[in-house]
Structures are given as C-alpha cells and as structure tokens.
Image (spheres, rainbow, N blue to C red):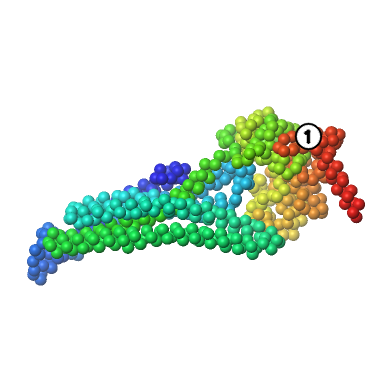
Amino acid sequence: MLGVDDRLVTDGTMKWVRVGLISGLATIPATIVLYIVLGMAVDAAYAQYLLTYGGEWAGKGITVQAGNLVISYMPWLIALVLVKAALSWLFRTGQFRASSEAKLNVRDRIYKQVVSLGPGILGKRRTGEIANTATEGVEYLDYYFSVYFVQVWVAIAIPFFLCAAIFWIDPIVGWWMLAGVPLTPLFVGSSAKGFRRISGTNEEVKNHNSAQYLDSVQGMSTLKMFNEAERRGVQIQNDNEIQRKATMKLLLVAQVQFVFLELGFALFSTAVAMVVSLYRLSNGFMTPGEAVAVVLLSLEFSRTLLLIGEFFFAGALGREVAASIVKFLNEKAPVKSTDSNKRAAEQGQAVGIELKDVTFTYPGATEPAIHNLSMSITPGETIALIGKSGSGKTTVTNLLLRTLDPDSGQITYDGIPEEELSLEWIREQIGLVPQDPFLFYGTIRDNLTMAKEDATDEELMAAITAAELKGFIDASPDGLETKVGDQGMALSGGQAQRLAIARALLKDAPLVILDEPTSQIDVETEALLNRALGRLCENKTVLLIAHRLSTIEQADRIIVMDQGGLAESGTKEALIAQGGIYASMLQTKHDIEQAAAAAV
C-alpha cells in the first residue's frame, strides 16, 4: 500500500493518513477561495478608490461593488484564514501522528522478529546492525510517513485544483502555467535510479559503521590490551569517511534538485504567471484583483513543485530503510509458532526428554551442526555432554530451549512432541546457567526478578544465600539495588556467575543446564560456585555441558559428541572400558598432568 509493505503500517497509521489526506486536500480549495476573495477585495477597494478620487477603469469590468474593504471583506478573509489554519494543523497532525504510529509499529515488529529468530540465529549476526536499523533506520521512516505518504497525493491534486481555478480566472495564464507542470516529474524521475542506488549504499555503510562502533566500545579492554585502539580508531575514521562521501552524494543530488526545482521551475513558473498576468492586466483582459489572485495561486504552484522534490527525497530514503526492514522481517524464524497451551506435566514436576534422529543445519551452512542425533534424559539423572568445540553441544542446548527447531527428527517431553506443547511451558522446565551469563543493565533485584517477577525480598535473599552471594550483598551499601553495570561489567566473573545461579535457583525449573559455569574462574571462587551449583541441582535433572573432564566425574551418564553426532554414551567406567574417544581424552589429560609434574 502506497509503496511499502503492509506490515509497516497499522490501522492507526491509516486512520491518521486519511485525516492528513482529507485535510490536505481540503486545504487546496480553501486556499483558492481565500485568494479569490482577496482578489475581490482588491477589486472592491480599487473601485472605491476610483469613485472617491475620480478616474476610469478601461479594462475588463469589475463585477464587485465598491465598498469599504474592512467592513465588506475582512470578516470573510479572517474566517477563511482560520479555516485554512485549522486544516493545515490537521494536515500536519495527521502526517506526524501517522509517522509516530508507524515508527512504534515498526520497532515493535523488529523486536518481535528478534525474539522470533532467537539466539540460535541472531548469535551469528552483528548486534550493531540490527540496533541501528531499529533506531536510526526507523527514524528515516519518519520522513517517509510524515512527508511521502500524504504529500504525494496532495502534490498530485494541487496542480489540478490550481489549473482549474486559474483557467476559471483567465484561460491564457492557465495554459502558460500548465505548460511547465510535466517538467518537474520528468526531471525528478530521471535522477531516481541513481538516487536509490546511492541511498541504498548509504544505508549499508551506516549499519556497518554502527556495528563497528558498538564492537569497539564493547571490546575496549581487548583493544587496549593488544594496543589496537589506535589502529581501530583509524579504521573507524576511514569507514566514517566512506559514509561521509555517500552522504555528500545524497546531499548533492538533493541540492541539484533544489536548485532546479526552486530556482528554476518554481521561480520560473511564478515569474511567468506574474509577467503574463501583468500583460493581461495592462491590456484590460484581467482586473487588478484577478491579477493578484493569479500571482498568489502561482506561488502555491511553485510550492507544489518543491513538494514533489521533497517527497521524492524522503520517499527514496524511506524506501531503502523500509526495504532493509522488510528483508529482516522476511527472515524465516527457526521455531514454528504454535498457539498450543498444552503442558506435559504440572509445574515443577520432572519430565523425561528424548531426541529421536534429530538433524539441524544453520541457515547458509553446507553441513549440519548435528545429524541423526538420538539421546534421552531421564528425570533425576545427571548427564554430562562432552565433545570438541563445534561438535554440536550448544546446538543441543538451543534445541532443548526451543530457540531452534530440528530440520528432521523429533524432540519429545514425556513422549509428547514439542510442537504440540506450549512454547512457554517448555522454557519453564529449563534453568540455564551459561558459561558467560548475560546480565541486563540495572540492579541485582532487576536481574533476579526476571526469573520470578513477584518474588519477595525473603525469596530473593534465600536464592542469593544459596548462590553464595550473600557476603557481597551485605558488603554493598545498596544491597539488592546495587547496579550491575552494562552486561554485568560492574561485577567480577565469579559474582556474575553466582548471580546467574541465584536467578536459576529462583526459577526452580526441574531441568538444569550447566554450560561449564566454572571454566573461567579461580580455584577459591570455583569452590563457592560448586557449593552453589550443588544446591541448584538438588533433586533436579541436570545436563552438564563440559569442556573440562574434572567437572563430569559425578555424572550418572556421559554422552560424547563428535562432528554433530553421538559417538559414545554410558557410565564413566563403561566408556573407559570401551577405549574410545572418552578414554583417549582421559589418557591425554593424564599424559599432560604427568608431563607437568615431571617439569616441576
């Protein structure tokens, strides 16, 4: 509709578009009537002047009666000015309310698409590009909806109304004005292709630069550690120069259009109307009031020419942004949406999970991340999932959380296929403690209540105590209101991990997934974490994704993954007896420890 995808507009948007369109179109006849009445007032004043001071008008007969301008026409002029002002206010209000409705809708859709795609897909995308599209990119839609949507139709209608009015006043002037109308769209259209190409390049460059800047801010410690901050700064400066050149090309096209449209067509059309009107007036074919009305109407004509250039510029920018947003919205969600409210078990009750011949391939990848994987998780069991990097362990986690759907095969909960179950219920069953937990900017309370919104202070402190974080809270002046910083940067690695454990304790899900939460901390902190993890995993089903063999010795069963498939499964003793991958990993670990001991 009107050149954009229907998903980018809402009923509210269209309501205000209609308000703006109707009031914008109504402004045209109101303006025409205002100028004609003003012309009649001029004729009446001139006729009164001739009566008062003597003289004779030899030209076209003045049809209005001579009289006092203030008494006869001022009330009408004031009323018409007020009507025009009210319609103009409605016109602008409609435009910008439509723009506001559209921007809110687009940002909401982008967020829902981000949620729909999930971490399994977005983890391979640049966050800065998505953020720039949702912020600055959507702001460009302001011009698109506030200028293009309504102005395009008003600008198309104005020449017809004005030509009809001028023809009614004087056909000769009307023909002169009509002759220049086709030149503007022809000129604008001739530059459209190049302008769209430049604006498309500009949008890509801006998204890239936003992502580079965000990466640099988030990775500042790494840049400083490797003394790469200066080189990165030069790279950003070069990228900004590319963006500056692309922006200047856009401005060049816009300024060329401004020169031709305003200094060329607009002023030329007004000058033509004035010259022809004066010529017709001097030869007696028009009255003074008619000449004034035609000149004023010609100014509206020139304003229309400027509007054409303006809405084209806004439309070209907006179309590129809209195209990139629509492309993002068209990305296929990795999880099929269902409206099911079915639950396999009551809240907090342990469930059995089974993967049957599951295969999954990431978009754009040539090889599946996992293929023909079959495994089961029995309630109350602790399973260690190990394997080399890239063997598919993280993909299994995303499949269990249902942020990804398998390409083939099936995942069941207590024998019920996951697609038949409520998505919210599935995620309620799992408490995740990742290797690098994400903490939102805000307070400790804010991050904890994500797990349980209505949690009391007693419940929060119980979870904090169980997670071995009470000492830190007691030592902090703000207690639960302590700020964690951006992505938890105000906390140490161990504190962030224990806060993530407290959050999982508060959720109290029957299945706990631990993605090597102790791999990047010191021995003393590891002891605290292990006590906290012990409390978290009491009477729970546990899936431990392990990278260090020392962390899996207490597992009831070990599953070894290799190249996306299940290579081995069994108890520690059974796998050692098999002499396979796990036994080889243990032997390698033993050899490294012996070599280290010998070196000492």
Packing grade of label 1 (10 A; few <14, some 14-19, many >=20) is some
On screen, 219 above or below 549?
below
Q: Residue at x 66, y 57 (%)?
A: 219
Question: Across the whole image, how many numbered discs are drawn on residues?
Answer: 1
Where is residue 550 shown, x and y percent of the image?
82, 45
Split into 4 quadrants, where in the image is the N terminus?
A: top left
- Can residue 508 be seen in the rendering of this structure? no
Residue 167 appears left or right of 143? left
Q: Position of residue 264 (x, y in %)?
A: 31, 61
Residue 275 appears left or right of 339: left
Which residue extends farthest top?
Answer: 415
Asked whether 88 or 144 is in front, the reply is 144
- Quickly name the residue at label 1: 568
Image location of residue 235, percent across then percent down? 60, 60
Amino acid found under the numbered disc labelled 1: Glu
Picture coordinates of residue 495, whole percent (x, y): 73, 54
Tell me which residue sits at (84%, 38%) in the image.
583
**Above/below status of 436 relative to 226:** above
The residue drawn where x is 46% and y is 50% is 320
The one nearer the camera, 248 or 466, is: 248
- Secondary structure category for the residue under label 1: strand
